[in-house]
Image (cartoon, rainbow, N blue to C red):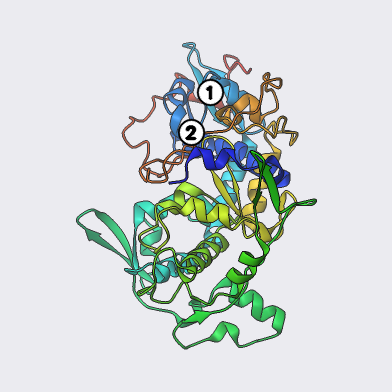
Amino acid sequence: MTQSRSVRQRSKKKRVHALEVATERWKVLTKVLAVIDTLKKEEEHVTPLKRLEILRSQLGLTKPNKVAHFVRRSPQLFEVCRDSRGVMWAGLSPQAEALVEEEARLLEDHSRTAAEYVTRLLMISVDRRLAIDKIAHFRRDMGLPHDFKTRWVHMFPEKFRVVRLEDGDYLELVSWNPNWAVTELEKKTAALTGDANANDIASPPGELSLSFPMKFPPNFTSYYKFRGKVHHYVKKGNTEQFQKTTYLSPYAEPGGLTPGSPEFDKRAVAVMHEILNFTLEKRLVTDHLTHFRREFVMPQKLMRLLLKHYGIFYVSERGKRFSVFLTESYDGTELIEKCPLVRWKEKVLQLTSYRGRIKNLGKFAELSDSEDYLFGNDDSSGATDSILDVKSEDSDDIMDDGALADDTEMDGFEAAEQPANVEAWNLNSSARIFY
């Protein structure tokens, strides 16, 4: 695992301010979308605030702030009322209802692209199959629909099928598509060199000798001093040697590679580079990658490899969960290429009270996950910097607390009783009290 000491030794100069801002923006959006997902599963899209309090941890909402406080901060998305019995309820606003319908259409339009990426994940895996529960971690990141586990997995029988094993349901590859066994890096390189036939390679994938694009923040220096010694973030000679090293394609059989060898490490970088390219925002929570170390033949100390290849990847250790970015895909705080689903998320963010003016970007403590901090009301601006202790990467059972990790997460709860007068939610009753 990567010890917290390794993270503490990273100089602030190595942090990319723009991507830290992008991380904070993503945190706000993740919490809001988690609440929207919860409400839209309820009849009439309303639920008692007490129920949301029970689901606080799954929604990623931190104490001591109340869920009601969080919901009221985005009145364009959420409405709060008290029924005739005095029970407080929360529901989706008309604007949020329209956004929910728009998202459903966009997810349907994105379905075939998502099917290609899921198929390619299966092609990368050593057994040509992946646990459905693990793929579910990537649901929002890859633009998979909400009914991914119940309906969507059966929609493309020519590509993959569901098989039941002793430890659960798996998605298994049905047919190998040689034209999909071409990495995104190969495609981009071919586009730059004018090789029009690069995407139609029918031969089995093998060795590659491509260099990975690297991007550094302005005024970046390649070294820092710690306890009187000079430490290099990026050693020029090592980087050049790494970029020249030939490696197996992520789609090639990885048998025979020695863990820790340059070839093994570069293939692992290629796998992570490919997976990040499959995501909508070219970023992932690092825990989601560690779930697939065995399936994708990646090193046990995956975080160390991500940190080592700074410039290809950027790891934000802000808050309780680490995020990894594909640096080449960002220009400042903005994703360079935005698909319709990303633009939809931006529309949702515009309807929140998030102002985009994050204070104290030097802080990396858990308080940066709090609602007051994310929405710009942090009262602890005078506190000294604190660095999060890194938890073990072996905690594969840790769920993503920024959103409900599974569409059936709340199946154990009984359906909430509706307000005494449901019509009151339609603005037809004077008993409805807004806050």
- Furthest-front residue in this view: 228
Q: On screen, 309 above or below 189?
A: above
**Left or right: where 380 falls relative to 205:** right
- Nearest the viewer among 328 and 220 is 220
- Nearest the viewer among 398 and 261 is 261
Indicate the position of residue 66 as horizontal and vertical percent values: 54, 19
**Left or right: where 352 falls relative to 170:** right
- Nearest the viewer among 211 and 108 is 211
Which residue sits at x=42%, y=58%?
299
Indicate the position of residue 128 as horizontal and vertical percent values: 34, 69
In this orientation, does residue 44 appear?
A: no
**Left or right: where 285 falls relative to 124:** right
- Nearest the viewer among 75 and 395 is 395
Badge 1 element: helix
Tell which circle, 2 or 1, labels the residue nearer the N-terminal end: 2
| Disc 2 packing (10 Å; few <14; some 14–19; many ≥20) | many
**Residue at the spot of label 1:** 67
What amino acid does circle 2 point to?
Leu
Badge 2 element: helix
What amino acid does circle 1 point to?
Val
